[in-house]
Image (cartoon, rainbow, N blue to C red):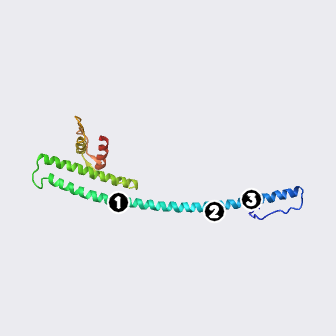
């Protein structure tokens, strides 16, 4: 029985204590046999459940990978479709600002500056969406450049001032000794604008 032979039984010839022990042994052997069969059945059932669950999880994981790939492709396409016209608009704004089509009035210059600011803002938002997508997939990029802080703050001040109500004004002052920054301009713009908002 200990070696795994479940067919072992003891013959009972007497009604004395040895016979009682033999009967008890046989009852124990039957119980062990039933328990072992139940355990094997449960183990087999558990293996089937684990295999089924594993197949289900693998299929789910495959669908998640496909969805992630579709999301990346969608964001890339949307980004291209949105960024292209914005870059064209910014190019035209720059040409008009340089008075390529003739002199501008002060009002026209202000309007062009507003168009340029808001177009750059939209371009930054699209970049942020892409960065979020890259961050979620473990890839994010930075465009490091040197620039002065004052013009960046002035852009943010102009954007925020258009939303101010009443006699509230917003000013941005940069000390003259502050050197040029070397970082990602779009991301810094977004961080400061979020603080102002």
Using the rendered view, name the quadrant where residue 165 is placed.
Answer: top left
Kindly identify which residue carries mark 3. Answer: 32
Residue at point 31% right, 43% down?
194
Alpha carbons under labels 2 and 1: distance apart: 45 Å
Kindly identify which residue carries mark 2. Answer: 44
Pick the residue in front: 11 or 96: 11
Residue 78 in percent (x, y) is at 31, 58
**Secondary structure under badge 2?**
helix
Residue at point 65% right, 59% down?
42
How many labels sit on residues? 3
Q: Is residue 41 visible?
A: yes
Using the rendered view, name the quadrant where residue 155 is placed.
Answer: top left
**Secondary structure under badge 1?**
helix
Q: Contact (CB < 8 A) between labels 2 and 1? A: no
Pick the residue in front: 194 or 31: 31
Residue 131 in percent (x, y) is at 34, 53
**Label 3: how many Cα within 10 Å (few below 14, some 14–19, many 20+):** some
**Label 1: how many Cα within 10 Å (few below 14, some 14–19, many 20+):** few
**Secondary structure under badge 3?**
helix
Residue 39 in percent (x, y) is at 68, 59
Residue at point 28% right, 51% down?
124
The quadrant the C terminus occupies is top left
Residue at point 33% right, 59% down?
76
Q: Earlier in the sequence, mark 1 or mark 3?
A: 3
Left or right, 33 with respect to 138, comes to right
Alpha carbons under labels 1 and 3: distance apart: 61 Å
Q: Is residue 143 visible?
A: no
Q: Earlier in the sequence, mark 2 or mark 1?
A: 2
**Label 2: how many Cα within 10 Å (few below 14, some 14–19, many 20+):** few
Left or right, 120 with respect to 74, comes to left
> Can you tell which mark lies on residue 74?
1
């Amino acid at each position: 029985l200990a070696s795994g032979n479940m067919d072992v039984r003891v013959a009972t010839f007497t009604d004395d204590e040895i016979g009682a022990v033999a009967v008890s042994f046989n009852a124990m052997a039957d119980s062990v046999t039933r328990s072992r069969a139940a355990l094997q059945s449960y183990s087999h059932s558990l293996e089937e459940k684990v295999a089924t669950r594993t197949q289900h999880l693998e299929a789910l994981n495959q669908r998640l990978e496909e969805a992630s790939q579709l999301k990346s492709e969608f964001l890339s396409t949307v980004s291209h479709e949105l960024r292209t016209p914005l870059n064209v608009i910014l190019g035209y704004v720059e040409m008009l600002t340089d008075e390529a089509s003739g002199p501008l009035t002060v009002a026209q210059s202000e309007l062009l500056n507003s168009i340029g600011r808001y177009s750059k803002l939209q371009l930054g938002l699209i970049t942020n969406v892409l960065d979020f997508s890259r961050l979620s997939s473990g890839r994010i990029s930075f465009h490091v450049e040197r620039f002065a802080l004052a013009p960046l703050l002035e852009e943010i001040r102009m954007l925020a001032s258009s939303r101010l109500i009443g006699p509230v004004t917003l000013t941005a002052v940069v000390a003259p000794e502050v050197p040029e920054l070397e970082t990602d301009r779009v991301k810094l713009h977004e961080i400061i604008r979020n603080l102002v908002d």
